[in-house]
Amino acid sequence: MKHILILASWFPEPNHPTKGIFVRRQAEAIALHHKVSLAYVRKSNLNEEEKVEWEHSGNLSICTVLSKGFGTLNTLWAYRQAERELLKRNGPFDRRLVEVVHPAGIYAWLGKLFLGKSFYISEHLDLFLREDLGLDQSRPFGRWLRGRIHRAAKGTTISSQALKVAFGKRGIPRLQILPNVIEVPDSEPDNWANPSGPKKFIHISSLRDHQKNIRGILAALKILQGAREDWEFHFLGSGTDIYQLKAESEAQGLGKQVTFLGFVSESEKVEALKTAIAHVMLSHYEGFSVSTAEAIAHGCPVIVSDCGGPGDFVRPNNGYLIDKDPEKLAQTLENHLDTYRDFDRQAMYHYIKDRYAPEAIAQAYDSFLDF
């Protein structure tokens, strides 16, 4: 058993429980085989004092430094404090792993530059996919700095083939695809039940229209509404666009069949996946799409646009990979209302479990970190 220091740029917070949830899941997966010390820096609220918070679970120790300071120097100093606290409590580290380059990667890069401490990177940022689509352009200095940090690392994992291509275009070396951890149910899903009412489609995300293309889904639902009425659509999740999107849905006359549920609990999300006939995404880009993989793990077929990450795991026996076109989506939804029972829910569950469950990812990290 080795000792891994994870320097996390993102991590769940009290007011943002889903922020960086994939980082936590990866840390927990690595901790199945090794001792893991995780350092995270969080900006404290106005009524919070600067302090150090601890969490322990099995082989995983989490040290969160609450910092009132703003700016890069304060953040770097806080990471230094977290590393020292973890070193004091848990002993020397065998590997250093950065989860998302900014800002933790700056701290790791300086550690290599001045102290010779090597590091690895697990990158989840889909910025390069956005740039390739012309949807976002980062500042030149930011691009230069990310490139320097990635080139200094012993290796970088990305979660999909689409991200590997995007990173490779920018000359970033030593890339390895290592998917996100998917929490699969403890047992196989039940067989399809007879619906007692309208058949239900769902969408789970942050509802950021510039990425998730919610307006494209609404356009498809308006087309579907003209063809048949034996369906309903539930949006699960919350974000800054939700109120405007809800108003637009009602203005289009979709209010009786389309519901915006807002943020839901984990148990409510699982129940939705169990009872839906499909999880629907029409995103412009996705680095991986955890919600799509989770849907398949629960035996819920997916209808998703060909937008990057999902192309690695969406197959004809678990869903549809379609163009980013509302008319094509409406056609697929209408067809699926009559054919959803053709999907083998148990086979879908095992497809995800064998590839993306915590133990599978733990073994992949053993290889990546040269153990």
Image (cartoon, rainbow, N blue to C red):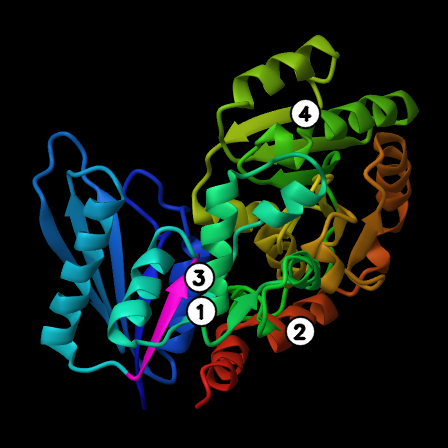
Nearer-the-camera pick, 31 or 160? 160
Q: Is residue 301 left or right of residue 317?
A: left
Q: Nearer the viewer, residue 130 or 215?
A: 130
In which quadrant of the rendered image does the N terminus lie?
bottom left
- Disc 4 marks which amino acid? Val
Tell me if residue 368 comes above or below residue 195 in the rendering: below
Q: Residue at the location (27% across, 45% down)?
A: 72
Type of amino acid under label 3: Ile
Q: Residue 73's spot in the image, x, y percent?
A: 22, 47
Which residue, given by chain and number where applicable, does mark 1 sit on?
152
Picture quadrant of residue 334: top right
Residue corresponding to mark 4? 258
Residue designated by label 3: 149
* Closer to the eye: label 2 or 1: 1
| Residue pointed to by mark 2 | 350
Mark 2 in CB contact with mark 4 (< 8 angstroms): no
CB contact under 8 Å: marks 4 and 1: no
- Mark 2 or 4 closer to N-term? 4
- Which residue is depicted at the point 51% across and 38% down? 139
Calculate the distance from the C-alpha at mark 2 to the C-alpha at mark 4: 31 Å
Question: What residue span does the magenta drawing correspond to?
Answer: 94-100
Confirm or deny contact between disc 3 and disc 1 (CB under 8 A).
Answer: yes
Q: Is residue 358 above or below residue 159?
A: below
Q: Secondary structure at mark 4?
A: strand
The residue lying toward the viewer, choosing from 172 and 370, is 172
From the viewer's perspective, is the residue at label 4 or at label 1 nearer?
Answer: 1
Residue 131 placed where, x, y %? 65, 42
The answer to whether any part of residue 370 appears in the image is yes
The stretch drawn in magenta includes residue 99: yes
Q: CA distance from mark 4 to mark 3?
A: 45 Å
Q: CA distance from mark 4 to mark 1?
A: 49 Å
Q: Of discs 2 and 3, which sits in the foreground? A: 3
